[in-house]
Image (cartoon, rainbow, N blue to C red):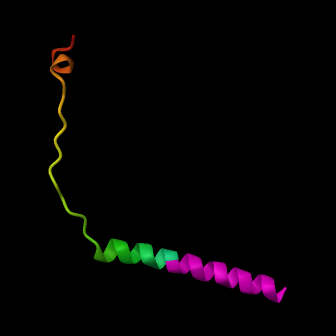
């Protein structure tokens, strides 16, 4: 039973570490905005 408790604590620790990393990424990393252009073929614009 002590090995099961140790395993559960280890899994909870890894989960908390992953969750903390995600929170840190959302708090400190800002994505760059850039312009996106999509070329539309003429045949699609004419509706043929």
Residue 12, by quadrant, is bottom right
Residue that lies at the very extreme toward the bottom in this rendered image: 2
- Does 2 appear above or below 33? below
Residue at the (44%, 77%) spot, across then down: 21
User: Would you say 38 lies left or right of 28 here?
Assistant: left
Location of the N terminus by quadrant is bottom right
User: Would you say 39 lies left or right of 26 here?
Assistant: left
User: Would you say 45 lies left or right of 30 here?
Assistant: left
Q: Majority secondary structure of the magenta segment?
A: helix
The magenta-colored residue range is: 1-17
Q: Residue 33 location in percent, x, y? A: 18, 58
Residue 37, by quadrant, is top left
14 magenta-colored = yes
Q: Residue 18 location in percent, x, y? A: 50, 75
Location of the C terminus by quadrant is top left
Residue at the (76%, 85%) spot, across then down: 5
Q: Residue 3 location in percent, x, y? A: 80, 86
Residue 13, by quadrant, is bottom right
Q: Residue 45 location in percent, x, y? A: 16, 20
Residue that lies at the very extreme toward the top in this rendered image: 48
Residue at the (20%, 63%) spot, across then down: 32
User: Would you say 45 lies left or right of 15 here?
Assistant: left
- Does 30 appear above or below 1? above
43 magenta-colored = no
Residue at the (73%, 87%) spot, across then down: 6
Residue that lies at the very extreme toward the right in this rendered image: 1
């Amino acid at each position: 039973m002590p090995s099961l408790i140790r395993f559960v604590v280890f899994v909870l620790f890894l989960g908390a570490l992953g969750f903390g990393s995600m929170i840190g990424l959302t708090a400190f990393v800002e994505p760059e905005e850039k312009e996106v252009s999509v070329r539309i073929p003429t045949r699609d614009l004419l509706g043929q």
